[in-house]
Image: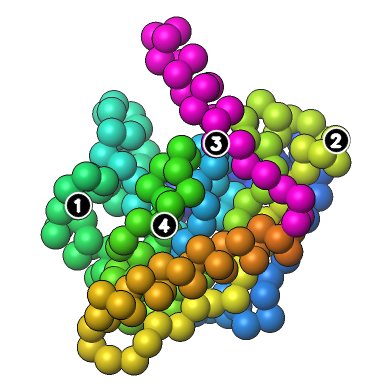
Amino acid sequence: MRLYYVLAYGIKALIRCVNGKPEVSYHEDYDPNTQYLIVAPHRSLLDPVIIAIHTLPHPVRFLAKKELFHSKVVAWLFEKVGVIAIDREHPSPKALKEAVNELKKGTNNVGIFPTGSRYSTEIKEGAAVLAKMGKVDLLPVAYQGPIHIKDLFSRKKSHRVKFRVGQPISLPEGRKLTSEQVSQVEGQIAEALQAVDDWIDPDYVYDIEVAKKERQARKNKN
């Protein structure tokens, strides 16, 4: 994971240089030396980058859709920084097992976007069960800031990186979660992510319709 640290600290310094001092805060119950399953809303390609650089010193192994591994260069880079490829429609036992084993090692965090994509706010199944199997708490976090990479290169306050780590979510006791408990935890995740957003800026709005139009425009262009 040496490349991970080189990139993480290098990008952190670069963003500080071109964007200014980020507005970063942490809930008092967060322990940077504890392993978590990190959950966050997905709004931008910048999300995993911002999460990674502000939850150091432990690396975050993100679960990412297999379609992102479209080229040998990208696949090589993702492998070096520990990204776990997953089929969002039909998650393989191998990918899930890799994520669970990573959590059980007690070394790295694992990151997941429970909405599944940037074009939905619905919390999907998986995060609660994965955290239970990995025997860790869930850690809600959120990034508010430029959606597009080019907008990071601005020191305007409106373009400033804002990031918050919320209060960890402990899971119910027992070997396995019931369907009812899974639903309850999913509700807790949604509430926790909203609380983190509200803490940063209660007036913040992520416009999904604009994101969908931009996606369609990219498709039309290609």
Are discs 2 and 3 less than 8 Å apart at CB? no
Separation of residues labelled 2 and 4 (CA atoms): 33 Å
Residue under label 4, please give it.
Answer: 123
Magenta extent: 201-222
Instruction: Identify which residue is drawn at 17% across, 48% down.
Output: 90
- Considering only vertical position in the picture, is 18 above or below 50? above
Disc with the residue nearer the chain's start (1 vs 3): 1
Q: Is residue 55 magenta?
A: no
- Counting from the top left corner in percent of width and height, residue 7 is at 53, 45
- Return the residue nearer the eye: 44 or 184: 184
Separation of residues labelled 4 and 1 (CA atoms): 16 Å
- Return the residue nearer the eye: 111 or 214: 214
Residue under label 2, please give it.
Answer: 156
Of discs 2 and 3, which sits in the foreground?
A: 3
Q: Secondary structure at mark 3?
A: helix
Residue under label 1, please give it.
Answer: 91
Residue under label 3, please give it.
Answer: 208
Q: Is residue 202 magenta?
A: yes
Separation of residues labelled 3 and 4 (CA atoms): 15 Å
- Considering only vertical position in the picture, is 86 above or below 73? below
Q: Is residue 49 left or right of 109 when viewed as pictured?
A: right
Disc with the residue nearer the chain's start (2 vs 1): 1
